[in-house]
Amino acid sequence: MDNQLSASAAHATDARNRSHRHPSQKGRTASGAKQHTRGWWALRWPIWKKDFHTSYLRLWEQPVLTWLTCCVIALSLALPFSLYLLVSQLMVFAQGWQAENQMMLYLNPGVELSEAQGIAARVNALSTVESVQLITKDQGLESFSSDDAIGQVFSHFEENPLPHVLVVMPNSMDEAVLQPLHGYLSELVGVDSVQLDLQWLQKLNAMLGLGWRIVLALATGFAIAVLLVVYNTIRLALENRIREIQVLDRLGASSLFIARSYLLSGAFLGFIGGVLALLLVQGAYYWLEHSIVQLASFYPMAGASVGVDGVVGATLGMSWTICLALIGVAVLLGFVSSAVAVYLRLSSR
Amino acid sequence: MIEFKAIGKSYREPGGVARSALRNISFTLAKGEFAFLTGHSGAGKSTLLRLLTLAEEPTFGELWVDGATVMAGPEERRQKRIKCAGQRAIQRYRRQLGAVFQEHQLLMDRSVYENVVLPLDIMGGLLEIEKARRVKAALEQVGLSGKELKTPMALSGGEQQRVGIARAIVHRPKILLADEPTGNLDPELSIGIMELFQRFSSAGVTVLVATHDFDSIADIAPSSRTITLNQGELIG
């Protein structure tokens, strides 16, 4: 063994050079590249596995601190996330209501059917109009005659008193589109009046705009809170491990080598916090489910899907994408704050 | 080759008084040379080794390794416009060092194997099976075979010292520095460790061993070069 160590010491540099040599430097072949990739994984995977294991174990060295951190992350994420879901669901309801918000154009009583068809064609050609439906005075009378009481009233008239009506469906419910369209249609020759409840739309849009701003402000505030909490936890972990960092530093470890397990710890905290936040929101939904379904039954709008299957992701607009996005954001926040903590600690070495 | 050029190191004590730990130290260590660094306690041996591991910067003077300036005092850097090693170069340099520290510097919550394999993990480029082979060989050299899974806490002071030595040699360094490596060892083991260092030296590794035990030098390697410090000055 003595001879073996002496001989190996003599060839230490050669061996080191060989192990670092890149096979692509001269005449890389397909099989060579495959072998290189396999070698690359074989060299790094055990180290990553070790870092993963270390970072996970490190968190449970102080279980109370870890759970507290995760709970704070979960609460910080759950509140803005719930509000986000609420506002987006309100948007779905609002779209359902807005879909019924057509403009009614009542034409002058003297306008003939051919003229009404001409006006309908002009309106339909507008870029801000999705569709136009002409309800002739005869069709109008026919629809009223189905009602016994109103039908009897209309039977006393010698002539049909109803005007032709155009039902206009704008292609946007944006106030900036509706206002000018309303003005243009009112000015058309042959148009008696245009009916649109703009004030109601204005209120709804203003409320939704405010809702989004509140969600954004809360999300930003709580994201900063998550950053600070994870930063503090990782900073404490770094302080507890200061001796280990010094030893690794003296052995020539790169900053990334030292930082890797701490970055993973931050990401772990974010992941657990994200999952807890999802559970909190889902739990809150179960609690409110009955009331929500009862409320939703009064507004049977198309597109407003309030399910009761109780599966995460199937209700309140919580798709799997949104669930994954929440966990992704949590992991990212954990990673970023631990990166800041590690950077500040290592740069002061 | 390691070259100390008029290196001095002083520390500022509470009250603002500067205390010189090293004064005007100049010497050269050739590649593969084996040398003892001797002197009484407080002579500056550990300070000199800390400078060599780049754990500290000199107050003045220059430290050259393989023909390049690794560290220099602020005055030299300003006057001669010397560009010293950056963070990455320092890390690369440290990976070529094998250092046995006086206070062992082991990670107490990790096993002996995990402690010894650290330099190989840091160096990278080796498969796990090769790392295991090298760790086994290094532990065998220091007489700790079969203790891979123990934690340093479960070992005696002398055994911890030997874990530190195994960690210093496992990655086959170019320069081996040892601060009182046999301080906690019995005479028989001390001789074994010194013989191991000498074999490394024969294989081209520069070895510098700091010790205040003059007797062991005479017994183990009477013909080896001795660098002697006294109150921060080089006297031989």
Image (cartoon, rainbow, N blue to C red):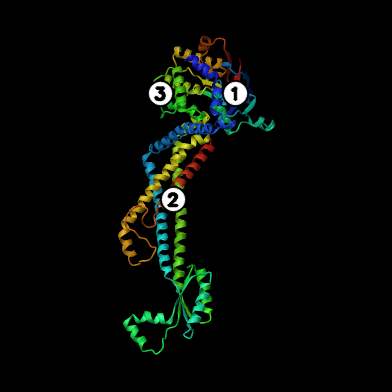
- Single out the mark in the foreground, 1 or 3: 3
A137 vs B101: above or below: below
In the image, what residue type sits under mark 2? Ala
Q: Residue drawn at (41%, 43%), measured in percent from left and top? A: A269
- Single out the mark in the foreground, 1 or 2: 2
- Single out the mark in the foreground, 2 or 3: 2
The dot on residue A325 is 2
In the image, what residue type sits under mark 1? Leu
Estimate the spatial distance between the alpha carbons at disc 2 and disc 3, rounded to whole Å: 44 Å
Estimate the spatial distance between the alpha carbons at disc 1 and disc 3, rounded to whole Å: 39 Å
Q: Residue drawn at (34%, 83%), measured in percent from left and top? A: A150
In the image, what residue type sits under mark 3? Glu
Q: Quadrant of the C terminus of chain B?
A: top right
| Chain letter of disc 2 in the image | A
Per the image, the residue denoted by label 1 is B22
Per the image, the residue denoted by label 3 is B148
Q: Residue drawn at (42%, 45%), measured in percent from left and top? A: A270
The dot on residue A233 is none
The percent coordinates of residue A193 (x first, y second) are: 48, 80
Element at label 2:
helix
Query: Which circle's residue, 1 or 3, is located before the other in the chain?
Result: 1
